[in-house]
Amino acid sequence: MSKLALNTRWLALWIGIVMVVAIVCVLIFSGLLSGGGKAKMQLNEEKGLLIVSNKHYEMAFYKENGGIAYVKQQGASEQLSAGNQTLWWAILGDDTSVQSSSAESFTYEWKKREGELQLRYSGPLEVDIDVRFGDDDRIYMTAALANKTSQKVRSFRFPYEMKINQSGVQDAILPMLPGAKLKNAFFQESNSFSDQYPGVMFASYLAMRTNAGNLAMYDLGDETTLLTEIGYKHQINDSGKTSFVHNYRTWIEADQKWSSPTVVLEIGGDYTTSIASYRELNGIGEYRSLQDKLGDDAAKYFELPLYKTDISAIKDASWDNLTTGFIDKMNYNGMIHLVGFQTGGHDENYPDFIPPDSKWGGNAKFQQFVKNAQAKGNIVVPYTNMSWWGVSSPTLDRLPEGTMLADIMVEKENGSVTQEDYGPHSGYVVNPGDPFFRERTAEEHRKLIEDAGFDGIFEDQWGIRNSPYVFNKAIPEGTDPSTAYFKGVRDYFEALKHRMYVEDGTDVLADDSIGFMGSTYLWDMLGYRKNTASYTEYYPLSGMLMRDKVMFYHHNLAGETMTDDQDMLRWNLAMGYNLSADFYNGVTSPWVDAIGVFQKHVLAGYTDQLVRDYEQLTETVTRTDFGTHQVATNWSKTDEYVLDEHTTLAVGGFDVQAKDGSVRAGNYSRYNGLDLDEGEHDLVEVRGKESIRIYQPIGSDTTLKVKTGDKWPHVSAIAYQANGTKIADLLVKEEGEFAIFDYVALIKDQKVGYVELTSAKEASQAAETFPKVKAEINFALGKTVTGTSVTDEAFDPKLTVDGDPFTYWESTAKKFPQSLTVDLGEEHAVSKIKLRLPPQDAWESRTQDIEVLGSADGTTFTTLEPSASHIYDPKTGNEVEIVLDAPANVRHVRVTITSNSAWPAAQVSEFEVY
């Protein structure tokens, strides 16, 4: 054979190989060969059903009308969803309806190569539904509608109420900040609840865990956010069923076309999986991070708790007094959140904030106050509300010629403007698409940032208001009455260049905000969520979605969720919320220092970390994984929790650990293998290479055992004030790699801010000892208490056993005698009663005549201490102590008040029994 012939044969062989490879590649990429994701989708027609399946799920549609027959998770013995005969349901302007099951005609087409089922409906509404199936656990559904009626379409319900067996529901998520996990009892007791996104709902996401598998339903949004009612609905006409609510609130005029967002059904994954999918598919991961938004200031901002500073509510307030009485006395920096500083006070004259009311000391002193606060390391952020303008504000009193109120405010369908009242305050809801709104708010923002020197701005209501329909002429391009309002809000936030905070929050606003302030916890407390509150366990949905993009706080104004008790501290650390306090009560409360310590040394370490996981360790114990930190939380009100052989969480306690070992904090009864002394103990341990600092801002004196630094020959311990001033050397006992010492809160009449351990060449030579003060146990704390009357529901008797001296009970006026009775739960040897009033100068000295009675059964009472006059003096803490002549074994303790020299009613802020 010639060399030429041999080369020719080899060339032909190589050409053949290349052609085969090319054909195989084409087959693979076209999905016709095994290995292509879509080729694995199968559609079978049987018993009047169109059944599509893959390795994750099986979904069946009725062949006659395209309704969902069922969804099944592969491997499960039961159907996950019973679907619904009706795939979509439209409500028209005259309240008539059109639904898929009664369409004039229905056709379908299966596109095998694309893995897509197309459903076509004709009639007064022409509706095309595309259902796309992949090789993953998701189903993608979109709807396109052409309105051939003479009516507008006000609502398009799609997919319409997918049904679930109530008895099989384990729990479900509602996207109310930070996330509400509904217990199975909500469904088994046939409850319903739904509300609007954007608004009460902060994400268009629902998810449920059932005995037959897990199902999530969520939208893929775009620049125009559709109003969507979401939730769960008991099926009145189908006993034993609940359903997913997913209704678009629309405004589709006659002869108009409309397309829905893509609706995703995700099958089988747990909450963490579908939440991650929602984040990824909606591009939330691409939003600007907190580090990007804050730059070099990020670490500083993370360390700052919020201090509500309502100058209009603080006694004898002025800009000078706020400096000397508050700013100069703070041990830890914070966000000074100014409220009520504008003329007229809180909820008046919006959007006119600058210059502030002159009665506080004038504009020059106001600006100096801001500079003084910032010079000490604080930031200053005001409360404003640009969404709701006061009816008598200066801005509305002098509108430019040609500008009408009806242009600026949200216009209703009937032509009237939207007006809302909050107590005695009245205002109009602004149309954010109006040019004058943009012009006027830009002017006010310039004054706030440039003239006043604020570090950022908080604006109320944008992130919690259920977006209204807008019938104004000026609406953003490409919107209709249903979408105009929130598109205006999004455009407004995108245009702002300074740091913005907003009430509550909506997922799409996280790209342009640095703080969301609010939670459904508050609304549950206030009774706004009566349908869900008693069934809710809070779940860090928002922390999984966007905690790296925006900081979370409780409501900026509400006293109910300020961090002034163990419940709020525990909740915030577990959910990843920043801490807050109200300066109305001054800076002397130990909780002011406590939130400063915990925010700076604990929460700051994971402020911008996503929640990776949230585990239920036991029925009452959870663990939140923030990546860099883990938080174990004991929610039990009665039992301690043994975390490990060295650590026990107190009743209602918690444990926070940085994974690098730099910080540990918690509320313990046993720490490092040593049982702590009786009482509360909120500890923070900050470990550096050269020193270890121990803080106990809240807690009783106790002996502590702390692991020393690596290769330290010996240990010295020094107690310091919070400002770093040395108080005293402490005696240390060394036990292997541990140091043991007494943490005493008050040494030499000085409050201990922290104890610092350092390496020493020799054992401690400290000679002075400082005796621990034994904790007194208040038998009444958190127990059931009743009163003979109450002047208003805001002054409930239960406030006297909540541990907060600033909340109080007040009886009906001018109707003495009045009594408080506490049930201690069991008999105790009672020897002392303490009664408190708020420890503030505003509560001037007063005398109340008080009798103490006791009972074993709650029916027959005997006098333990006869009526006598007792003086409350704000200079000594407004506290009355009544010591019994001899201990009395009683279960019920009653105090009867027959007079009050300063007010014609009985008043008690804390009722303590020892």
Image (cartoon, helix red, strand yellow):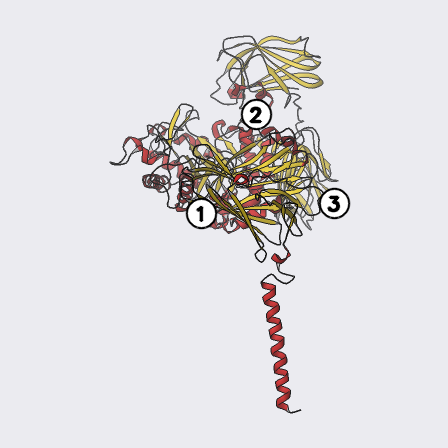
Q: Report x, y in % for residue 303.
A: 52, 42
Residue beneath the point at 67% across and 14% down = 892
**How many residues crowd around disc 1 within 10 Å: few (fewer than 14), some, or many (20 or more)?**
few
Residue 261 or 841: which is nearer the viewer? 261
Residue 877 or 262: which is nearer the viewer? 262
Eye-nearest disc, 2 or 1: 1
Image vertical order of residue 886 relative to residue 89, above or below: above
Eye-nearest disc, 2 or 3: 2
Q: Report x, y in % for residue 368.
A: 37, 37
**Tag 2's secondary structure?**
loop
Image vertical order of residue 848 relative to residue 776, above or below: above
> Which residue in the structure is indicated by mark 3?
736
> Which residue in the structure is indicated by mark 2?
804
Q: Report x, y in % for residue 404.
A: 29, 34
Residue 424 or 822: which is nearer the viewer? 424
Image vertical order of residue 669 relative to residue 16, above or below: above
**Tag 3's secondary structure?**
loop
Image vertical order of residue 188 relative to residue 49, above or below: above
**Tag 1's secondary structure?**
loop
Q: Is residue 860 visible?
A: yes
Kind of residue at disc 2:
Asp
> Which residue in the structure is indicated by mark 1?
223
